[in-house]
Structure formats: C-alpha cells, structure tokens
Amino acid sequence: MNGFLDRVLGRVRLGGWLAVAAPVIAVVFAVLITSVVLLVAGKAPVEAFTTLADYGTQPRSMAMILNTGVMYYISALAVAVGFRMNLFNIGVDGQYRLAAVVAAGLGGAAVVPGVLNIVLVIVVAVVVGALWAAIAGLLRVYRGVSEVISTIMLNAIATGLGSWLVSEHFGVLTGNDLGTRPIPDDAHMPGIPLIAGTPVLVNGFIVVAVLLGVAYWVVLNRTRFGFELRATGKSESAAVASGVSVKKMIVVTMVMSGAVAGLIGMPELLGASYKYSNNFPAGLGFTGIAIALLGRNNPVGMAVGALLWSFLDNSSNQLQLLDISKEIVQIMQGVVVLSVIIAYELVHRYRIVAEQRRVSRELAAPQEAPKAEAAA
Amino acid sequence: MKILYGMQRPDEGEIRVNGSPVGFHTPADAIDAGIGMVHQHFMLADNLTVLENVVLGSEPRRGGIALDFAAARKKIKKISDAYGLGVRPDVPVEDLGVGDRQRVEILKVLYRGARILILDEPTAVLVPHEVDELFDNLRGLVREGLTILFISHKLDEVLRVADEITVIRRGTTVATVNPRDVTSRKLAELMVGSELPSPETRESTVTDVVALSVRDLTVRTGDGRPVVENVSFDIHKGEVLGIAGVEGNGQAELVEAIMGMRPCEAGALTLAGADISHWSTLRRRAGGIGYIPEDRHRHGLLLESPLWENRILGHQTRRPNVKGPWIDRAGARADTRRIVEEYDVRTPGIDVDAATLSGGNQQKLIVGREMSGDPVLLIASHPTRGVDIGAQAAIWDHLRTARAAGLAVLLISADLDELIGLSDTLKVILRGRIVADVDPANVTPEQLGSAMTGAGEETV
C-alpha cells in the first residue's frame, strides 16, 4: 500500500467531490484558526476578512493578483512535476533565480533584436534552469545523493553564483540599485488589458502559464512518458518490473522540473522589471511547494491555490490600515497547508473504505438475485 | 508470529503465557510478558558499540539523567557468561561478524528480561559453523530454563535443535510431532501436503523449438555471495519448466536476472534465437517475455490506480495501449474489458482501483495482462499464491491452454502439487544451484520435498 507521504504529495487519486472537499475544509479551518488568533490579539476577524475581500475584488487588485499568481502557478507546476514521481525538487528557488540572472544578463546585452530577444531570454532561462536541476538529478542517480539535500545546497550556491554574475559581469549601477542592464523596449512582453476598469495590464505570460498547465496535464495523463513517470511515483518496484528505467526517469524529471522552474522569473523579467536586481522577487520556489501541496499537483487545483496565495499576499498590506499585522496572512497560509494535508488524509481514508464497500456490494448483488428468485 | 509479538491483533483465539491469557497491543506488551523476538534482519546500529546497542531504548539511569553504563556493562557480562554467549560489550557492532551480531540480538532480548524467545529464520544468514555455534547457544539457553520458538524452513535444522515440532501450512497447524519420531522426509511431506495431484493423462505439447535458453547464469549479492550459481536450462515452446525449491534458494534472483531487473554476472540468455543478455527489462518484455511476479503488490500492480492503467503497466510500449508516444485510452480500456471478460476478473468496472479487488481477481488481471500480446515465454512466479481455490483453478487452466498454444512457461512455485501437475520438466534448486532433474510423471511430492531440502538427494 502507498504510504502517508504518497498521499501528502498527491500521487494518490482522489475523485469527484472528495477532491474538492478537502481543500475547502482546509481553507475554512484556516479561516477559523486565523479568526481565533485575531480574537486573541484583540482584533475583529470579520472586519479583517471583509477588508481583504473588498480589496481583492477591486479591478486594480485583481490584475495584480493575476500577475503574481502567474509566477506562483509556474513555480507550483515546476514542483509538481517532481512530486508526481517522488522527487522533492526543493531547488526550484535556486533554479529560477539563477536562470533569471543569466537570461537577464543576455537579454540586457541585446545580442538579437526584438521578439528574437524575448525568445532568446526564455530559451536561455529554460536551459539554465534545466541544467542546474540536472546536477541534482545526476548526483542522485550516480552517487545516491538525496535530491532534497543537493537541491537545498544548490540553492545556496545559486544565490552566490547569481550575486557574483550580477556584480562582476552583468551588473550596472542605477542610483543605489545594482542590477543587470535593462532589456530594451522592443523585447518587452506585451501586457493584456484583461480586466476592465483599471489601467493595470495583465502580464502576457498568463498565456504561457495556461499553456504550461495544459501541457503538464497532457504530458502526465496522456503520454507514455507521463504514465511511466506516474507509475514510478506510485510504485518504484512495480515500475522497475515493468521495464521503466528509474535512473533515466529521475534525470529527465529533474531536468523537466528545472526547465519549468527557469520560466518562473520570466513574467517579472520580461513583463515588469526588465532586469535582475536586488528587488527581483525571491522565495517563489518555496511558495510553489506550498501551492503544489494545496492543489494536489492538479493543474486546476494549483491554479486556484496560486490565486488564493496571490490574493492573500497582495491584500495583506490592507490589514495594516486596521492596525493588524500583515503577517497574520502568513499564519493563515501556514494553517492552510497543514490542514490541507490532514484533510486529504481523512478524505483518502474515507474514500478507500467507501470504494471497498462499493465493490463488495456490487459484486454481491448479482449473486443474491438468483437466490432471491429461488426462494420465491 | 507477528501476533505473538504484539505487532498484529488476532481476530479470534487466545494466547496464554505461563497459563494466563494475555492480549498484546504493542510489542512493548509482549516484552513485558517476557516474550522477545530476534528478527531475521538484524536491527542493530552499526556505529554504536555492543553495549550501546543492547541498552538502546531501555537505558539504565543514574540520578534520573545520566546513563549508568557501568551497571549495564555488568549486567551484560552477567547474562553473557550465564548463557555462554561470549559477547564483548565494548566492540562497535560494525566490526562484528554475522554470528556475533546475532548473539548481540539475542542478548538484547535477554537484557529486557525475556524468558520466551522467538527466532525468525535465524540461520538464513549464517554459514554452517555459525549455525552449529548458534545451536550450542540455544541449547545453553534452554538448559537455563528459557523457552525458544524456532521458526525455520530448513528441516534438518529443526530436527537437530527442536524438542517439539509444529508444522504450519497455509496458516493452519498441520501437525505437532516429536523430532525423534519423524524423518526429514516425513516432515517434508507434512510441510507440502501429501495428496498427489489428480493424475492427468494429457499429451505433451513440448516441441523442439527452444524458446528460452539459459547458460551458466550466476547472480551475486552486493557482498559477492552467489545466490544463483551456474544455472543452465532450455525451455521449449509448449513446455512448462518447473523450478522446485524451498523459498530463498535463489528462485527470486533467477527470475529477476531473466527479467533484466538484476544484473547477472556471467551467463548467456537467448530468447527465440536472439541474445538478450544485454537487453533492458523493457526490451525483454517487448521481445515476448510475460511476467507474473511473485509479489503482485510490489511488482505487479499500481494498487491505487484504476484497472485500465494497470493494464498498461509493463506493456506501455505496445498496442493497444499506446499509439506512438501517446497513451491510447480507448484501446487500453477496451482491452482491459476484454481481460476482465475472458479471465473472469470479478470487478464492478475497469475504473476501480486495483487495491479494491481481492487477491485472486488481482492475480487474474495480471495473468490476463501478461498473456496478451502473444508472449514467447511466460515467467510465472508463484502464480496462485494467496488466491482462492476458484481463481487457482482458472489460472491453471489458462496456463495449460497457453502451453497447448505453444507458450513456453517457467513456473516457480512452493506448491508441489502445482509444480508436479503443471510441469513437463522439473528441476530442483538448492542454494542457488540446480541439484536435480525430476520427471514430474513419476515423482511423489515426498520425493520432491526431500530433494528440495537436500535431505535425500540420492533417492531422486
């Protein structure tokens, strides 16, 4: 039987309304816990949540929530690829930051004009992310190094390597801010006026994110490669007996996860700041882990999770108007992740029992029927 | 055994220790009642000393906080001397040999005050002279008034060391005998069941065409010990070749080597004329090897995936499951329905998880899957283990039909009736070597049982 970890990481199927029930329960539970914390702190929970909701439904905030959500979503996809086969790519964070530094440096140099530069930046980011993740994959396969350890260490190395690249090679000083040379105007990703009533444009990468989500689903559920990946995640021993080369799968999955991770920084780089500097968003890789857990590696579930996270992060500042510390949002996020794990476990147990009961009932039914006839 | 040690609850019945009934919820309860278990696989921390390993979990305290190693050392010395175990408390466990480690395990149990010892296959990892030492130790313990429950597959050992033998087959007590009154052949008969298989007058379907040829196959464990040694055989089309042997004599490793799941050191494998020695598992499967694994939960199924996805497992490169790189859902689902139908898999549908089916139905699904795609060779490892009688008969029928259609079958089983009834050729494996060829038409389970345990090699 699969272990608790398999369920936590969403490699176990949950169907129908049960799959939705668990995260809903978790969010409701998190709201309750957060309310208790607010009450203990002497604040009014209802007021706090109304403020959050009011802010979140304004057109301007909605556009901003979408923009942050796009990055969160891509990050969650990168993490989920690994989770589906038992690989903990904790290094998504380092992979996207290093990818962004190198891509920003090359993009800023403007070696090719216009749209070609956009393509170049994206390709470079994908390749750098993939290669950085491949190191962990190869170490795991050839040296048995746990990818958890190696990716965490590679995160630290990526931080140092990134700083060195910026300060020694790509960096220009604008005022106080040391960053890469900005990418020229002709290579900016155009925004989309998706939400009426606000001048804030939605990042063009939302299209890429949606396509990635679709591709993630198609590759995992509809291709032979995806089948082998899921089979390996569910039972390595069965995969080996079925002729799946687990070593190859580990490296390929790590590379894929890193390639997607390389894209995380692109909405910011090509659609917002146009350069890599100290202000570049950090820690997105860890947000992605939380969202992948919350969304159970399901492409739609993770999209909802990414938007929820983005909503909380974007509107947290509003709480300060009520004299509530904005860190209350982090408490809520933490509780959501913890309770969703528990909720999934409960739902899972319920489902197993329910299905076994259903199977035995359906199998028993046809045998009882003739007996009833005979009795009659 | 797990129940005795409190790891599992009994459904019914009762356990009495020294006459009083007990109920164990955890191993701790069992330890309190004076029962200690020495596991087949040692549970020792290599980097700690013997002393530290022994006290681990029940450390003597001094003043509530500090560890009282002096007291522990004295106690260990006392136990060791009393039972003649000869354990040195301050040596790191990593420096000890297998026999010494086992004595440490025994001492660990005694240290916790056990008066009843359960030894699970204690000789599996020992070489003969270590076995002799162990038996001397055990006799010492018994002299001091301890009770020992010795669980083993090896008949000669049980006969040598036990005062009373209880034979268990398929979960029920078959007989309790006095070792002085039985021969190892009689014991083997009790172990495997003595009823002869219903004599089948069936014509041989064996052809001259060799489907699989194995030459000088040797498989070694990580530490270089050979578990399969110089095994050679041919299986012809339409032939069932049975391998008889007490479990743990290299059968599992032999199968894994043929499947390409385990590297084999020497030897050549030829499947239908092609040298497959260096093929990957996937290529071997695609080349026509079907595989019914010994442990269907570990190797045969994705328990928490629907049946139709399990249909694809191991056949993920072949029609009707895939078209190019894409999974052909419609094709796989239709073929799963066919298997469910033809092989009588009792299930409400093909979308339920494999875990919800009974063992017999899971096995029928696997058999159906492995028979699809016209295999050249079927490796059937304990194909009817843990399945109900109905499923067993159905699986046997499928094997016979496939054999008549020209399939070559390598049959590995612990069920001697199954082996004798199905096989055209029988080979006996003992300690990784093929030790005897047996004619299944003229052998009794008793003779086969003796050959398997090495008790009467000359008689076959």
Image: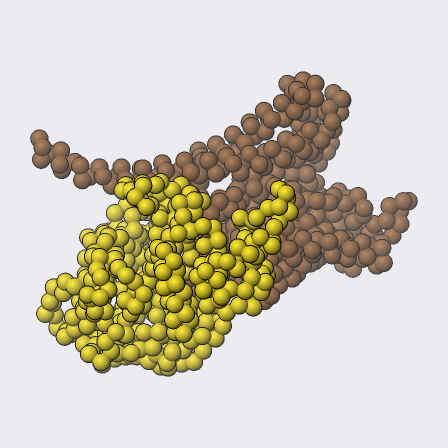
Chain colours: A brown, B yellow
Image position of B248 (left or right of B180)? right
Residue at x 60% of width, y 66% of height: A143
For this rendering, which residue is in front, B412 or B338?
B412
Residue occupying image coordinates x 32% and y 74%? B430
Residue B262 position in % (x across, y down) = 44, 70
* Image spot of residue A270 (x, y percent): 73, 47
Confirm whether residue B1 shows in the render: yes
Q: Residue furthest right?
A: A175
Between A42 and A191, the one nearer to me in the picture = A42
Q: Quadrant of residue A330?
A: top right
| Above/below status of B166 relative to B125 | above
**Residue at image location 75% in from the left, 50% down from the top:** A187
Towards the viewer: B388 or A258: B388
Residue A18 rendering spot, x and y as whole percentages: 44, 34
Position of residue A42 in the picture relative to residue B332 (left or right): right
Residue A67, compared with residue A126, is above or below; it is above
Tag count in the figure?
Answer: 0
Q: Seen in the image, is A208 located left or right of residue A215?
A: right
**Residue at horizontal 31%, vertical 37%?**
A358
Q: Is residue B120 visible?
A: no
- Give the quarter of the image for residue A316: top right
Q: Position of residue A17 (x, y in %)?
A: 44, 33
Q: Quadrant of the C terminus of chain B?
A: bottom left
